[in-house]
Image (cartoon, rainbow, N blue to C red):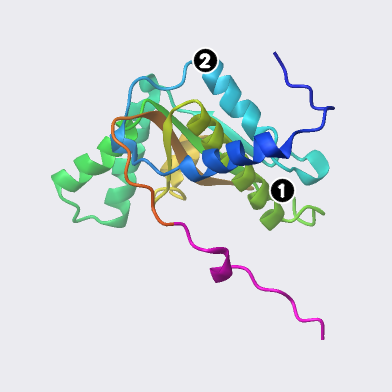
Amino acid sequence: MDPDLTSPIDPAVTAPWAATLIQHRQTILPKRLAEPGPDALQLEQIFRAAAAAPDHGERLPWRFVLIPATARERLAEVFAASLVERDAQATAEQVAQAREKAFRSPTLMLAVVDAGPAGDEIPFVERLVSAGCAIQNMLLMATALGFGSALTSGKAMESKGLRGLFGLQPHEHAVTFISVGTAGKRKAARLRPEPVRFVTTLSSG
């Protein structure tokens, strides 16, 4: 059943629940994410969470590309080729490790941000913030559904091979890979920074 978005929320109920969810989210390394991953319905919920991100001008400046098991070998080849391009002396073991990263976590996708046309009134930084909000919404929904998740990037993100594999246009940027799966073991919650460390007040004069 869809929620009634016209009704006011009860902060006494929703605020503690939201705080618990947000604080419970943590990065689980992709190699520690196992089956089962989200099913089709759960993936739909995760993507609908992304759709709730702020999007000035409704440009939809981001998209996500799912990488099914049948396509992981293609991604592995890109990771391996990118490493060899950067380091011609890479060992066979290092190349194998680069390839293996493509097979971690049952659900893997790439987040892509559209920088937009030159001179567009919505600047790239705002588009990037929108993408970050969409991604965080996805991570929180994954957490609410009982899954672990992680964001990973690396030096292959801007490689010609990766851009070609995902059909990125010149104005598009590969931002991060998103991994989702079942966490076999969770780490102890890390200590979050206190607001005093990152909040200041502008002087009145």
User: At which x and y percent is residue 126?
Assistant: 71, 54
Q: Residue at x 57, y 64 (%)?
A: 195
User: At which x and y percent is residue 187?
Assistant: 32, 44
State left or right for residue 181 relative to residue 17.
left
Given the image, on which type of amino acid does mark 2 rest? Ala
As drawn, the label of residue 40 is: 2
Please indicate, yes or no, whether residue 80 appears anywhere in the rendered image: yes
Magenta region includes residue 200: yes
Magenta range is 192-205
User: At which x and y percent is residue 174?
Assistant: 52, 45
Point out the image quarter for the N terminus.
top right
Please indicate, yes or no, whether residue 169 appears anywhere in the rendered image: no
As drawn, the label of residue 167 is: none
Element at badge 1?
Answer: loop
Q: Main secondary structure of the magenta part?
A: loop
User: At which x and y percent is residue 178?
Assistant: 46, 37
- For label 1, the residue is 116
Q: Residue at x 52, y 15 (%)?
A: 40
For the residues labelled 1 and 2, say whether their Cβ atoms are less than 8 Å apart: no
Name the outermost residue toward the front.
12
Q: Residue at x 52, y 47 (%)?
A: 175
Given the image, on which type of amino acid does mark 1 rest? Gly
Q: Residues within 10 Å of mark 2 (few under 14, many from 20)?
A: few
State left or right for residue 125 relative to residue 101.
right
Q: How many marks?
A: 2
State left or right for residue 73 relative to residue 151.
left
Element at badge 2?
Answer: helix
Q: Residues within 10 Å of mark 1 (few under 14, many from 20)?
A: some
The foreground one among 33 and 166 is: 33
Q: CA distance from mark 1 to mark 2?
A: 30 Å
